Amino acid sequence: MPLLTPWWRLSRGKINLGPISLKTFLIFLLIAIFFPVPVVLAGEGAAVYREQHWAVTAEKFELALERLRVGKKTRIQSPIVLVHGLFVNSLFFNLDEEQSLARYLAKEGFDVWNLSLRGTGRSLGPLKGGAKSWTLDDIIEKDLSAVIRYVQKESRNSQVIWVGYEMGGLLAYGYLEKKASPGLAALVTIGAPVTFNHPQQEPMKRLLKLEESPALKKIFLYLNSPFLGSYLIPLIPKMEEFFYNRENIEEEIKEKFLANALAEINPGILDHLLRIIQRGEFVSAEGNFSYRKNLAKIQLPLLLIGGEKDQVAPPEAIRTVYRAVGSTDRTLRILGPRSKNSAAYGHIDLILGKKAKEEVFSVISRWLKQRDGRE
């Protein structure tokens, strides 16, 4: 446990201190407050230091941010915020020493902040009251600014790089469309579509049965993602193929992913997702604002990454974003044999694939360094 944990979390039952005396507890508390010591992640090459932070929103949600970097000073000026997708938590970006976009970018000289969105991982709700249900609109309008301001303050840098996987990319699209001064220097999205009417995405429409049966929806939410995913995905080949290319992910990595990186979906997020699938495009929860139709408002440097075999975010869906954004500095990479990659990438293997480090992570790092003037 990092000793950067704020003192108020010790009273919230989130950390098991074991059978220690009050005196010992107070000693540790004083050390945590006055002498924070980052945890060092062992691994090949330079040591990666990890710190735990929380960005507090206006609604008093405490959003966990794990900071990873090599040393106190990083070679790349702008810090990176990593933002995960639906049904997964932030461990998706830091599964182990080898399969970790977070550690890879830290070792490349970046100041990396791995975010847990509200309702996932170590992120916490308000001490009293607070919303129990929320939508993607709520996160866009209420959470992202708090995260960006916090990272700006702690890193002492006014510009932040956003790297969003799937939903993490959609959130960035919405944020950039609605905020006049977003505080972002560049955006990287991975498997992040705004259209949901492509033939490969047809299996998503099965979720609409939840709208027809409130009882079925209650059962789905009761069992929720970790249970359903860890048991059903390996048992149903078609479900596996929808989420990843089975030939492009190691069995050990798949097991770690299913055991550690899945997350529950909030009821409000589920309703919002169903509205998006029903409409066939990324719209607001009320359906009165089209994020797809406002992509031209995005003007900053943008790297879009997709997979040839991705059924959640098919290549044509990623190309739709590429054509619609207003950025003059925009790059599209669809990974697969046609681009001389080792395999046709699916959805999850864009991060957890056998050669993701060489074929995906390196593309992100090189593109960002070129915009920082390092390459």
Image (cartoon, rainbow, N blue to C red):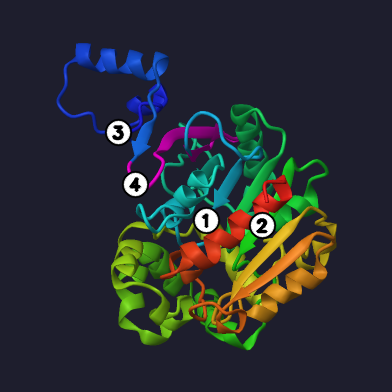
- The answer to if 21 sits in the magenta stretch is no
Q: Which residue is mark 4?
A: 43
Q: Which residue is mark 2?
A: 367
Snapshot quadrant of residue 4: top left
Q: Which residues are magenta?
A: 42-68
**Spatial CA span between label 3 and label 2:** 39 Å
Snapshot quadrant of residue 333: bottom right
**Spatial CA span between label 3 and label 4:** 26 Å
Which circle marks residue 84 in the picture?
A: 1
3 or 1: mark nearer the eye: 1
Answer with mark 2 or mark 1, whichever residue precedes in sequence. Answer: 1
Answer with mark 3 or mark 2, whichever residue precedes in sequence. Answer: 3
Q: Give the x, y percent position of residue 254.
A: 34, 69
- Within 10 Å of the Cα at label 3, are there few (<14), some (14-19), or many (20+) other Cα atoms? few
- The reply to whether residue 305 is in sight is yes
- Vertical arrangement, residue 115 with respect to residue 235, above or below: above
Which circle marks residue 344 in the picture?
A: none
3 or 2: mark nearer the eye: 2
- Within 10 Å of the Cα at label 1, are there few (<14), some (14-19), or many (20+) other Cα atoms? many
2 or 1: mark nearer the eye: 2
Which circle marks residue 15 in the picture?
A: 3
Q: Amino acid at mark 3?
A: Ile
